Amino acid sequence: MDKATIIPVLTHQSESISHLLEKVHERIKLPFTTEVKREDLVVEVMLAETALHNITVHIASDKLVLAADIDESGIQVCQVIDLPVEIAPDGVDAEQCGTMVRIIAALARPEDGPAAWRDIEV
């Protein structure tokens, strides 16, 4: 089993995310999934390579940006994800395990999750 690495999560107001993106010139898009599980939003991002440096998650209530430092060839990995539900920015954890980054965020309003998950017994 791969060892997980904790990733820093920086919170932003929604408007400041667009300012962050103005600095990014060339992006590599990454495949990702989003899923509501109980009262959390789980986002899994598959990294194209494992030699990325200083991966950071920038989060606002409705948007997530996963970015890494610019590599030797001048390419920066940056993935912008519009979130399907509003999250509580103070309730976010992120970790990297091999080539996958998992971000778990508490829903701002758990009642916004899909109706189906509320009826499942745990």
Image (spheres, grey):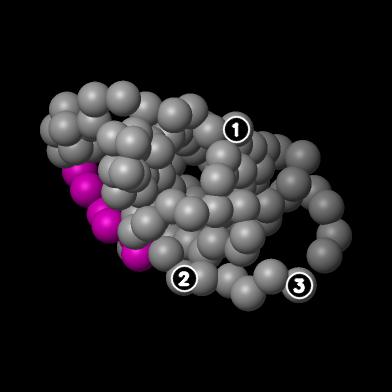
The structure residue drawn at horizontal position 17% and vertical position 27%, both measured from the top left corner, is 22
Q: Nearer the viewer, residue 29 or 83?
A: 29
Q: Which residue is mark 1?
A: 31
Residue 65 percent location from the top left of the image = 36, 41
Where is residue 31? Give x, y as percent.
Answer: 60, 33
Q: Farthest residue toward the front?
A: 73
Residue located at (54% from left, 61% from top):
96
Calculate the distance from the C-alpha at mark 3 to the C-alpha at mark 2: 16 Å
Instruction: Name the kind of residue labelled 2 in the image.
Output: Ile
Front tag of 3 and 1 = 3
Residue 89 seen? no
**The magenta segment:** 8-14
Q: Quadrant of the C terminus?
A: bottom right
Give the numbered dot on residue 1.
Answer: 3
- How many other residues sit within 10 Å of disc 2, few (<14), some (14-19) or many (≥20)? some
Answer yes or no: do the residues labelled 1 and 2 have beta carbons within 8 Å? no
Q: Quadrant of residue 46?
A: top right
- Looking at the image, do the residues carrying marks 3 and 1 touch, with CB atoms under 8 Å apart? no
Q: Is residue 6 magenta?
A: no
- Say which of 99 and 95 sits in front: 99
User: Between disc 1 and disc 2, whose residue precedes?
Assistant: 2
Residue carrying label 2: 6
Classify 10 Å Cα crowding around label 3: few (below 14), some (14-19), many (20 and above).
few
Amino acid type at mark 1: Pro
Q: Position of residue 38 (x, y in %)?
A: 67, 55
Secondary structure state at the residue bearing disc 3: loop
Which residue is drawn at the image coordinates 57% and 40% (left, top)? 48
Specify whether 117 is left or right of 57.
Answer: right
N-terminal of the pair, mark 3 or mark 2, is: 3
Number of residues whose C-alpha sits closer than 10 Å to that of mark 1, classed few (under 14), some (14–19) or many (20 or more): few
